[in-house]
Image (cartoon, rainbow, N blue to C red):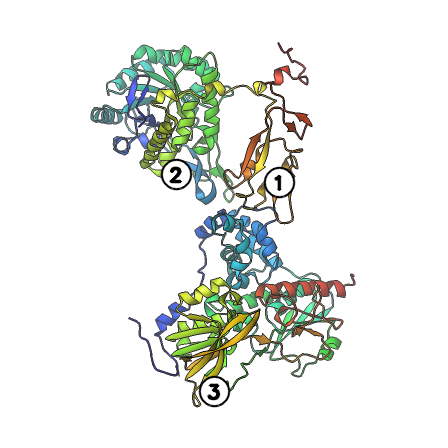
Amino acid sequence: MAHINRENGVAAGRLDPTQVADNFTDLHPEYDGHEALVAADRCYFCHDAPCMTACPTSIDIPLFIRQIATGTPEAAAKTILNQNILGGMCARVCPTETLCEEVCVRETAEGKPVEIGRLQRYATDTLMASNSHPFTRADKTGKSVAVIGAGPAGLSCAHRLAMLGHDVAVFEARAKGGGLNEFGIAAYKSTNDFAQRELDWLLSIGGIEIRYGQSLGDGITLNALQSDFDAVFLGMGLTAVNALGMDGEDKDNVSDAVDFIADLRQASDLTALPVGRRVVVIGGGMTAIDAGVQAKLLGAEDVTIVYRRGQEAMAASSFEQELAQQKGVTLICNATPVGVEGNGSLTGVTFAYTETQNGKLVTLDETFTLPADQLFKAIGQKLGDTPDALTLEGGKIKVDDAQRSSVSGVWAGGDCASGGDDLTVTAVAEGRDAAMDIHATLMGAS
Amino acid sequence: MADLTSNFLGISSPNPFWLASAPPTDKEYNVRRAFEAGWGGVVWKTLGMEGPPVVNVNGPRYGAIHGADRRLLGLNNIELITDRPLEVNLAEMTRVKKDYPDHALIASVMVPCEEDAWKEIIPRIAETGCDGFELNFGCPHGMAERGMGSAVGQVPEYIEMVTRWCKEATDLPVIVKLTPNITNILHPAQAAKDGGADAVSLINTINSITSVNLDAMSPEPMIDGKGTHGGYCGPAVKPIALNMVAEIARNPGTHGLPISGIGGVTTWRDAAEFMALGAGNVQVCTAAMTYGFKVVQEMISGLSQWMDEQGYNSIDEIVGRAVPNVTDWQYLNLNHVTKARISQEDCIKCGRCFAACEDTSHQAITMSEDRVFDVKDDECVACNLCVNVCPVEGCITMETIAPGAMDERTGKPVADEYANWTTHPNNPGATAAE
């Protein structure tokens, strides 16, 4: 029986290293060649395929699956990457159950879709393992573009611009690129340092320089970028987090789930990462699930995710919810926090039940307290400080269909921009589309 | 329960499923296990002349065509006749027949086209107690280069001659195995009949190259960088075999000549189809080579269940039952009008019917914004392609338009009477309707 450290409080080494390593293995192990062929055989090569329509990056899914089936996964990868340069990561993190696989006609026919995500991973992994890059740069245009943020939107934009012959400077606030792929996704979805490997592979096209430790507003102004570059793309994501706005939020061991996830992703030794014996996560999105599940996998004895609305309203997909429950995480819905308990250190969180009455969420009188020695807040991220010149919409940078912001010569995409679903795949699509419009603009097309 | 006992040419076997002369029937060990597994009979792997046996290649003998999930659809082989000494085979056959008197044991034979050779070996083989002979005039590879196998089967005069020699040499039934590597199967079948054959069996394998190794630029199976054509069999050849069986069964000259049906029989249904087209029994090889001897159990249970459901009591009741309905194109009823019907309830919206019809047929299927597929009766010629490409069985069907109802495509009501090409006004050679 594996050793379990039941010490109260927040402590490291709750599980032995073997158990931790086992807990954090790949969520969807990669196919071997035979499995890929069997899975690919199931695709019907639909006309005007629903899966392709459902994909935010419009990958030609029937074509790439047929290319796998006929023994050319490298060609399949090119089909994927042509639409989505981060196809490798999207294959791992896309909520396929609500996108391509949800509309697969075999889901209709049998309740078992073609496993598009895993097939995509097979193709892209095969290509990346060959250490080759399928795209080359066009002749240099002499134009240069500044990209803010080396996350999915920024990288997608930068790659497409580089491919089209422009020189790209990417300004990245952190010391590493990848954005949420590197800092914000559960470790079991991106094993073996995949985000960095994919970043290195993406950059191998050339023409992209990443300047680390530099962010907009911190010594760099939009005006300066506009004068130094021919165009600017903003893809800095959501850099601020929402607060509960209640007393006790500053107690020890109360923190933002995104920080916990980032720390976990950057930890060189997961057994050295402290986690509470009893952990409470407040929120109902992917971040809440990622934090809760990973806390459990690190050895927390009890992990409870509490969401203020009904389960059907959770932003996390049903697949993610089931994953949490499978891993032993408790989901409590219709409860909102009303008190953070403890003197100095956290001892518990008090919640009041809620109910939706006439479309409005109402807090009821009845309360309950969950004992807790660690609390993660996962109630949403928001835009950090942005240049005043930019018009906002719904708390995000307002963009049009071509990802143009209200400021001429400035485009935006990804989580910081309006529209989209805060998914990696939509960020990639927006970055790519912005690049195409920047290119058209810089090259004098209409 | 239906009686599956087969009495082909007076040779009794517990069921009509025989293993064809091929690798599965090359030796006592296999044949005993086949009988134990339920096979009704075997045609022993082809015997050759006494003396040093033939040799086989020492590289791969088989090549294959695969469908989805590597389902084996076609198999090709370059194996020759038995490469074991004649006396060993004869001793084994004798022992097996003695222990399995109720199962059919047929000797397949191939020796040079010389009267003495055939007349010497036939009586000698008969001493094993075998129930009959099958003359291998079919193998298209290797032995054909030496003037045997399909080299004989492609010359009707030789077929007739050798068959006659064999009939003169034995009182046992003689089956002539035909090669499909010929333009008209009726000629060799007629020759066999003229030579006195008790039956024909068909088809033997089809000349084929299954694939090319694109690295070595050689046909597969590849032997030291080279390949040769082999004999193709398995599910892929069944349609070709069914047609040849049917042609012999319905041709006035050969009608009534007993047929042992061979070619891609994989399930009970395949067997029932061969028998409906005139085969008195079937021979199986590729299915056994793919799935093992046990596969016969499904053939037995399936045929039995189907016969019970249909009210057939014996094999004889199904043999040839579909033959009267095999006709020439010119006699098909041109006044029979059907239209495709798509069951919206069963449709999974893959759109393959639309792509097939729109791109390659008659633009008779519409696709709506929300992926609802409908048939345009005014364009549908009832070609059946949509039915064939639809992945959901029974989702698209053909509805017969009743006489008197309007055919939207022609703008005329469907005629009640039968009418075919022979009397059609567009036919320059049309004969006046009587």
Element carrying mark 2: loop
Q: What's the distance in space between the residues labelled 3 and 2, CA to CA?
A: 76 Å
Q: Quickly name the residue at label 2.
A: B59
State the residue position of label 1: B374
- Residue placed furthest toward the bottom: A343
Please tell me which residue is depicted at 60% across the width and 66% down the height of the picture. Answer: A421
Image spot of residue A35 (x, y percent): 44, 52
Q: Residue at x 59, y 44 (%)?
A: B351
Q: Is residue B160 above or below residue A293?
A: above
Corner quadrant of residue A275: bottom left
Q: Amino acid at mark 3?
A: Lys
Relative horizontal placement of residue B221, taking residue A7 as reference (left or right): right
- Tell me the mark number nearer the camera, choosing from 1 and 2: 1
Packing grade of label 3 (10 A; few <14, some 14-19, many >=20) is some
Neighbour class for label 2 at 10 Å: few (<14), some, many (≥20)? few
Give the left or right position of residue B216, taking residue A216 as reference. Answer: left
The answer to whether marks 1 and 2 sit on the same chain is yes
Q: Are marks 3 and 2 in contact (CB under 8 Å)?
A: no
Question: Label 3 belongs to which residue?
Answer: A251
- Discs 1/3, front: 1
Query: Pointer 1 indicates a residue of which chain?
Result: B
Q: Is residue A79 above or below residue A215?
A: above
Q: Is label 3 or label 2 in front? A: 3
* Amino acid found under the numbered disc labelled 1: Asp
User: In the figure, residue A445 lies in which quadrant?
Assistant: bottom right
Q: Measured from the top left, where is residue B82 in percent x and y?
A: 33, 28
Q: Nearer the viewer, residue B255 or B402?
A: B402
Asked if marks 1 and 3 touch (Cβ < 8 Å), the reply is no
